[in-house]
Image (cartoon, rainbow, N blue to C red):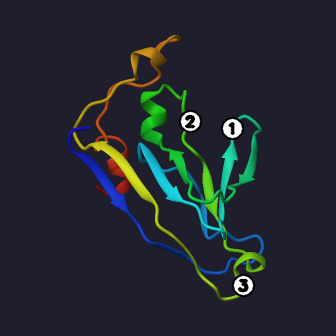
Amino acid sequence: FESPLLRMRLSCYPHTPPGEFGINPHVDTSFFTLLATTDATGLVVFGHERREWLRARHIAGSMIINTGETLSRISNDTWPATRHYALNPASEGGLGRCRYSIPFFFNPSAWARMGVVPSCCDGGAKYVPISYLEGQGVAQGE
């Protein structure tokens, strides 16, 4: 990770009516994503152990870390990518009030080829070594 690819995005989520998403369910292609919590959190994550969607709680002064597809791949799915979506329901934000989010995406060096970490290969590696740009970077248009 000598020259990691870093990205910060300012996102605005307008009011979402019932049954609609502020951003549709997805996983990040990054290694990981950092997200500050607010008292009007709209982040909903899929709990792999409980196999259900869970609303992220606000804990003052804390950060949420979403694992991305790149980390999932090099950990041989030991750390699965966090499937998530965003909401901004009127009951929590007030009609017409936008909710803002500033996610920080951390990605590995563009051309560094990464294979599965040896300590995660007990049953054999599921993935061949690949660089970020050969894999996830293509999906991101980088």
Image position, residue 98 (x, y; %): 59, 81
In terms of secondary structure, where does tag 3 sit?
Answer: loop
- Residue underneath mark 1: 48
Q: Looking at the image, which residue is at 71% across and 87% down?
A: 95
Q: Looking at the image, which residue is at 58% across and 61% down?
A: 37
> Considering the image in quadrants, where does the C terminus appear?
bottom left
On residue 94, which mark appears? 3
Kind of residue sitting beneath label 1: His
Q: Looking at the image, which residue is at 40% across and 23% down?
A: 116
Pointer 2: residues within 10 angstroms few (<14), some, or many (20+)? Answer: some
Quadrant of the rendered image containing residue 135 = top left
Image position, residue 59 (x, y; %): 65, 56
Quadrant of the rendered image containing residue 57 = bottom right
Q: Looking at the image, which residue is at 42% across and 25% down?
A: 127
- Which of discs 1 and 3 lies nearer the camera? The answer is 3
Kind of residue sitting beneath label 2: Pro
- Residue underneath mark 2: 80
On residue 105, which mark appears? none
Image position, residue 19 (x, y; %): 76, 70
Kind of residue sitting beneath label 3: Gly
> Considering the image in quadrants, where does the N terminus appear?
top left
In this rendering, the answer to whether 101 lies above or below 80 is below
In this rendering, the answer to whether 93 lies above or below 111 is below
Quadrant of the rendered image containing residue 25 = bottom right
Earlier in the chain: of badge 3 and badge 2, it is 2
- Residue furthest to the bottom: 96
Q: CA distance from mark 1 to mark 3?
A: 31 Å
Q: Are marks 3 and 2 in contact (CB under 8 Å)?
A: no
In terms of secondary structure, where does tag 1 sit?
Answer: loop
Earlier in the chain: of badge 2 and badge 1, it is 1
Earlier in the chain: of badge 1 and badge 3, it is 1
